[in-house]
Image (cartoon, helix red, strand yellow):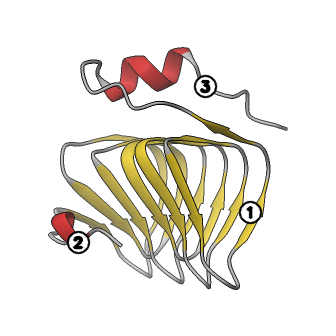
């Protein structure tokens, strides 16, 4: 997973349900439910986590349920218990045995000079409703 980014700065706990928009520097771990868009350096969705919205990050690990589009500058990893129901825009996509991906994927070349919010929000794959 995030070997270089194991430190979790922000946690949405298992008994927490948040609706809104989150923008942060660092790593966000979601073990509860989040409805809305997330912009962060790194996002980890735990096995019991559920995100409904779009995620923009350097890297995203999906261990729970992700409903929406994910845009990652470096990679998206779907763990054995993970489900990604939406489109993926990334440089690298890994789906572990048992992981589920339902959507479209678009592979990008890395562009290290531009900010993640500019690169991917302007070129995002439209969310299916």
The x, y position of residue 71, in whole percent, is 52, 39
For this rendering, which residue is in front, 114 or 13?
114
User: Is residue 108 rendered to the left or right of residue 74?
Assistant: right
Q: Is residue 80 above or below residue 33?
A: below
**Is 97 above or below relative to 6?**
below
Q: Residue at x 58, y 75 (%)?
A: 64
The residue singled out by tag 1 in the image is 101
For mark 2, what is the residue?
A: 3
Mark 3 to mark 1 CA distance (whole Å): 18 Å
Q: Residue 42 vs residue 128: left or right? A: left
Residue found at x 17% / y 65% = 4
Residues packed near mark 1 inside 10 Å, few (<14), some (14 to 19) or many (20 plus) = some
Q: Which percent across, then down, holds residue 8?
A: 19, 68
Quick check: 126 left or right of 8?
A: right
| Mark positioned earlier in the residue sequence (3 or 1) | 1
Q: Which residue is mark 3?
A: 124
Query: Which of the pair 82/28 is nearer the observer?
Result: 82
Q: Quadrant of the C terminus?
A: top right
Q: Dot 3 lies on which element?
A: loop
Dot 1 falls on a residue whose secondary structure is strand
């Amino acid at each position: 997973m995030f070997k270089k980014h194991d430190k979790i700065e922000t946690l949405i706990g298992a008994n927490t349900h948040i609706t809104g928009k989150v923008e942060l520097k660092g790593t966000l771990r979601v073990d509860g439910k989040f409805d809305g868009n997330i912009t962060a350096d790194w996002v980890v969705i735990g096995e019991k986590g559920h995100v409904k919205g779009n995620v923009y990050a350097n890297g995203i690990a999906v261990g729970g349920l992700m409903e929406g589009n994910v845009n990652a500058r470096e990679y998206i990893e779907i763990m054995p218990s993970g489900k990604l129901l939406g489109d993926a825009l990334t440089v690298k996509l890994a789906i572990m045995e048992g992981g589920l991906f339902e959507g479209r994927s678009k592979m990008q070349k890395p562009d290290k000079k531009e900010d993640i919010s500019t690169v991917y929000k302007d070129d995002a794959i439209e969310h299916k409703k």
